[in-house]
Image: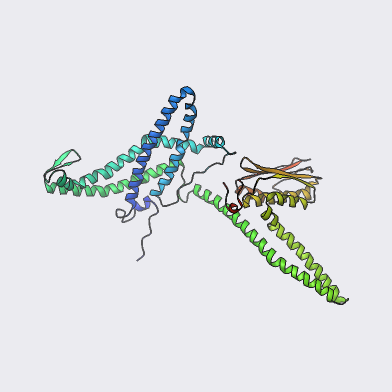
Amino acid sequence: MHPRPLSRNLWQALSARGYLLSAWPWRAVAYLVTGASAGALTLVAITAAVALAGVLAVVLVGLPLLVLTALVGIPVARLERHRLRLVDRAPAPVRPVRQPPATGPWAWLTTRLRERATWRELGHALLFALVLWPLDALVVVFALAVPLHLAATPLLMATAGGGEEAKVLKQWTVTTWPAALGVAVLGLLLLALGAYALGLAAGARAELTRVLLGAPHEGGLDTRVVELTRSRVRLVDAFEAERRRIERDLHDGAQQRLVALAMTLGLARLDAPPGPLADQLAKAHGEAAKALEELRELIHGIHPKVLADYGLPAAVADAADRSAVPVDVTLELAGRLPQAVEAAAYFVVCEALANLGRHSGAARAEVSGGHRDGRLVLHVRDDGRGGADAGAGSGLTGLADRVSVLDGRLSLSSPPGGPTLLSVEIPCEPCDPCERTGPCA
């Protein structure tokens, strides 16, 4: 016999056999009870905040407090998203958060107030505080508390009534044991029906929460978009790790073998007498030297060691030194940045310098930028003929996609006659060397 698969959510559990003997009725009770408690606390908090803001409005302190009250929906929504785990085994939905354009509380506040999700969550908090939590409490009372009270009639008769009578729901009196047992059986039947009623109520309540908060279903479009974005970030990190591994293997393996081969051929040339053999050895030695030089260029293009060891400013300066066009570099960074950010910025600069060397006809170029307001900002400017098109096979389209994975932006301004300006902005924060493999906050 194959074991039955575990139900992933409350709706699946309701339609499966063994629902009454599973943990799902208790999870439904926990969802409704915590909802009633959280809703009551939300009502108290909103009422107190509005009342305090009204009192302090005389001295103009209440107005900022009233604005902050509009954000009460954010923690309430966060709690509600986590409470959904009681009726759904899927991971808790994550609120899509827009990054503030700058650091500091004012930038965070203005960004949150401009988001539609903030006002949806405020509306949900008001509905939760005024309407939903009393309904949760009523369902628990009628579907759980009343049947339990009926089922406990014999116990009440034996304790509170002295074995002679029991008050049922404070409405009628039971004076015989057969009647008390009958009421208890009725209570157990109602308790079984109430377990299904609690499941239906908790499931409907969770669906309403998802609709009000825009919380994505498992497998829904929103979840797929979030997972796609995360997978793209993981692919970029994996790609960078693979580039570093290839660079390390080529540097420590093939390059060392070519160096040894070139040295052996050079020694053989010295020992060989003049003639055809010496000429062939000289030719082979020259080809080995060329192959070694090309391999070093290849390694540098895969992942330059100067970028890994000394950071973005040194790597950009090295790229500028190798450019066919004179380049002035003004790049100021206080510390190291995440590896993915440094790599994306470096290769954008290299591609831009390669393009202007081949197509722009520029006499001079400039790379400038730094870290400002939580963003890495880079500008590559040249005095060439202009007319560059990022979508015309320049290689910048793929780099723009790579920057966008990091929530960055790449823009190109190149009117005919010039000048050409390529700008890159990537949100990030400086990292300690030990933290550079992960995202920095």
Would you say residue 210 is visible in this rendering? Answer: no
Residue under the point 36% across and 35% down = 131
Q: Nearer the viewer, residue 382 or 317?
A: 317
Q: Nearer the viewer, residue 321 or 177?
A: 321
Decide if residue 276 is on the left or right side of residue 388: right
Would you say residue 156 is visible in this rendering? Answer: yes
Decide if residue 220 is on the left or right side of residue 181: right
Residue under the point 37% across and 44% down = 204
Which residue, as the protein is rendered here, is positioned at the far top? 58
Above or below, 270 relative to 20 = below
Which residue, as the protein is rendered here, is positioned at the far right? 274
Q: Quick one: quadrant of the N terminus? A: bottom left
Question: What colour scheme governs how the chains and residues are painted in the rendered image of this protein?
Answer: rainbow
Q: Position of residue 37 (x, y in %)?
A: 35, 40
Decide if residue 28 is on the left or right side of residue 105: left
Q: Residue 271 falls in which quadrant of the image?
A: bottom right
Q: Nearer the viewer, residue 125 or 11?
A: 125
Above or below, 223 relative to 273 = above
Decide if residue 111 is on the left or right side of residue 359: left
Q: Position of residue 156 (x, y in %)?
A: 17, 45
Residue under the point 72% across and 60% down = 298
User: Tag count in the figure?
Assistant: 0
Q: Position of residue 201 (x, y in %)?
A: 34, 44
Q: Position of residue 197 (x, y in %)?
A: 30, 46
Residue under the point 16% across and 46% down = 159
Q: Residue 275 falls in which quadrant of the image?
A: bottom right
